[in-house]
Image (cartoon, coloured by chain):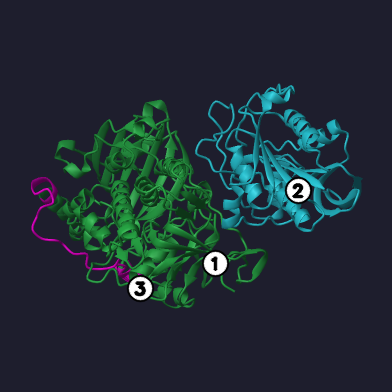
Chain colours: A green, B cyan
Amino acid sequence: MAREAMEYDVVIVGAGPAGLTTAIKLKQLDPNLSVCILEKGSEVGAHILSGNVFETKALDELLPNWRNENAPIKTKVSKEKFLFLGKKSSLSWPTWLLPAVQKNHKNYIISLANFCRWLAEQAEKLGVEIFPGFPASEVLYNDDGSVKGVATLDMGLDKDGNKKDTYQEGMELHAKVTVFSEGCRGHLGKQLIKKFSLDEGKNPQQYGIGLKEIWEVSEQQHQEGLVMHTAGWPLDSKTYGGSFIYHAENRQIYLGYVIGLDYQNPYLSPFDEFQRFKTHPAIRKMFEGGKRISFGARALIEGGIQSLPKMYMPGALLIGCDAGTLNMPKIKGSHTAMKSGIVAAEAVVENIKNKADLSIYEKKFKDSWAYKELHAARNVKPSFSWGLILGIIFTGIDQILFRGKLPFTLKHKHADHEALKPAKEMPKIEYPKPDGKLTFDKTSSVYLTGTNHTENQPVHLKLKDPELPIKYTLQKYDEPAQRYCPVGVYEVQKEKFVINSQNCIHCKTCDIKEPSQNITWVCPEGGGGPKYGNM
Amino acid sequence: MKILVAVKRVIDYNVQIRVKEDGSGVHTDNVKMSTNPPDDNAVEESVKLKESGKVKEVVAISIGEDKAQETIRKALAVGADKGIHVKADNYIEPLGIAKILKKIVEKEKPDMVFLGKQAIDDDCNQTGQMLAAMLNWPQATFTSKVNLKEKSVEIVREIDEGLETIEVNLPAVVSCDLRLNEPRFASLPNIMKAKKKPMEQINAKDLGVDLTNRIQQIKVEEPPKRKAGIKVANVAELVSKLKNEAKVL
């Protein structure tokens, strides 16, 4: 029997900054369009995690009146610092020597989750229908091969796939145009890129994992508006990464660490590098006596335009980081994601009204300031494959002297999952034991994410070959899933590979970093996953 | 037959509760809110009774700020027919809630009131009992099974000693346990239909009941942190520690 189906003009997958922007812009351009957004989180914002120092450029274009609409964008950046860390030492880099892309004096420290909740209210006022707790789990195609829409996941299946009493069949959502805005490594976006060969002729995509904590500190330790970044220790010079420390409102500090997923040592644990980072004397003093109130992690895009796939296909568009629009040297993606959403909406309206080809979306994007920005930023990340020092020197020349206008483009040579070296060739890393005050273990951290998946449901982390982790990955790489997963979903117990999928926080790192690409992240039952507050 | 089912908006059970530093309460800003879990069971059972043909109408009520309407919409999306939102911006104790519910009962004239056995935020477990007393109706609490008859309802109760079966005459107040049923998911089309179902709005102040809180809250604090356990080498050491350190023997 055919599933129930609903027809919309536009279906958007994912209520992040890109998807919500598209919805708002569509309704501004034509209030009669029917637009709906599917969101896998239990509410808008529940799965949003970002730094975030926010550049308002795209928002100024979308909702110029946002200052009078009580938008949660309040804390203006008042001071900036950049530190190079040695094991015990720290060197402050003068801010006038920072490339322009890293200057933030016009920007705001925000919670992207709260901003998305606000955007969702604006969208709903315009008549957009938003359905949180309904993950899109499959792409539907027309007979001619074009994208027809998506289907939501069946609910109420037990772990073996049998129907429980609460079973409810998923339903189909058909659209004239389907817009995919799932964020970095969207599981449908990944399928579309493959099916339509959207990445043909592009460099392999590059990713990072971002970990974030929110701390409440004393008034003396807090300096509202301070934006600080560090590079160096505890990472070795071959590993790309660094920290962010943003002093937000209400004596809160947003603290985070980003590590490029092209790291080589299978013993590296991004979670533990982050914890260790906090013990540096220059960092420790900012948090001592404070209280950690939130934790989370999410993969992010680092590939830039070299890895940006074709963003359109028959019947559908990829926007934001489902395509990969983050500006890495700027460490920002919300404004470019929103800009891609704005031009996507313009293209969709022209497509529906005047039968314009969807390729105009990519043309419009390439003509936009967002693409110019990404173009100027393109050589920074690949230059760090030469190591930290050469990377900094090159970036100084590229970004300060030439402002990103050097007449060549560096390439990303490998996909992240190809970067790991065999365990026997790499040094083991001993991480210090957490003290439960400044540094923590994974168990207490996952508790703070509020993540949960109904117990008796199919495992949403699929192994292509169930034997591979023990037979091959454990031998060769000492099964790095035990370490790259920031919440301990994967364990090796007595020669058995255990997947604690109920702990998953949907960061997608396993789907990216597994050396044989043996793990596939699929959608769990709706409403599952983290319940982030103001991340 | 008609059922009035009460639902409360509480902090989602997956969220880690944070106590405010000044001890005045807990943080609710940017916190995921949901329907109180046993209230979900109360809605589910009401809807099941309606589907069985024994009940004609299910009315969902919530008392609280404007966002309580989301909680009512959820009940409408799984099958309730009509919503009543009693708007109140301040915290109201169970006694006040029971008084409001009594007023609504007098107006709506249901044959049964279904509600959760207690709310997971204040854990009072009082509203159902107080309401029954004020209405002078029979009450059946901690219900894990409902068998509705013509003029009475047979109830299985979860009690310390096991299961107790009682039969109460209608009209009655029934408070529901988590074991009663497994609440269904709301489907997309039903969520959309729920947006069009009627929702009446009433101001708590206009009901003419005394909502003054009687309880003075002195302080809210986190439970003490559990200390890490230790391993003992043998039974003798365990006994000695229980005797001398824990002083429980």
Amino acid type at image mark 3: Lys
Nearer the N terminus, badge 3 or badge 1?
3
Could you give the CA–CA distance between mark 1 and mark 2, rounded to whole angstroms? 39 Å
Q: Which amino acid does label 1 sit on?
A: Val
CB within 8 Å, label 1 to label 2: no
Q: Residue at x 79, y 46 (%)?
A: B2
Chain ID for label 2? B
Residue A17 x/y as whole percent: 37, 48
Task: Tally the numbered discs.
Answer: 3
- Looking at the rendered structure, whether the residues under marks 3 and 1 are on a common chain is answered as yes
Helix, strand or loop for disc 3:
helix
Position in image of residue A431 (x %, y %):
40, 54
Residue A412 visible here: yes
Task: Write down the residue under mark 3.
Answer: A195
Residue A321 lies left or right of residue B43; in this view the side is left
A24 or B43, which lies in front? Answer: A24
Q: Distance between the residues labelled 3 and 1?
A: 25 Å
Q: What stretch is highlighted in magenta?
A: A398-425
Do marks 2 and 3 share a subunit?
Answer: no
Residue designated by label 1 = A459
Q: In the image shown, does A135 or A150 lie closer to the viewer?
A: A150
- Tell me if residue A514 is in the magenta stretch: no
Tell me if residue A231 comes above or below residue A415 in the rendering.
above
Residue annotated with mark 2: B57
Q: Quadrant of residue B25?
A: top right
- Picture layout, residue A260 above or below residue A194: above
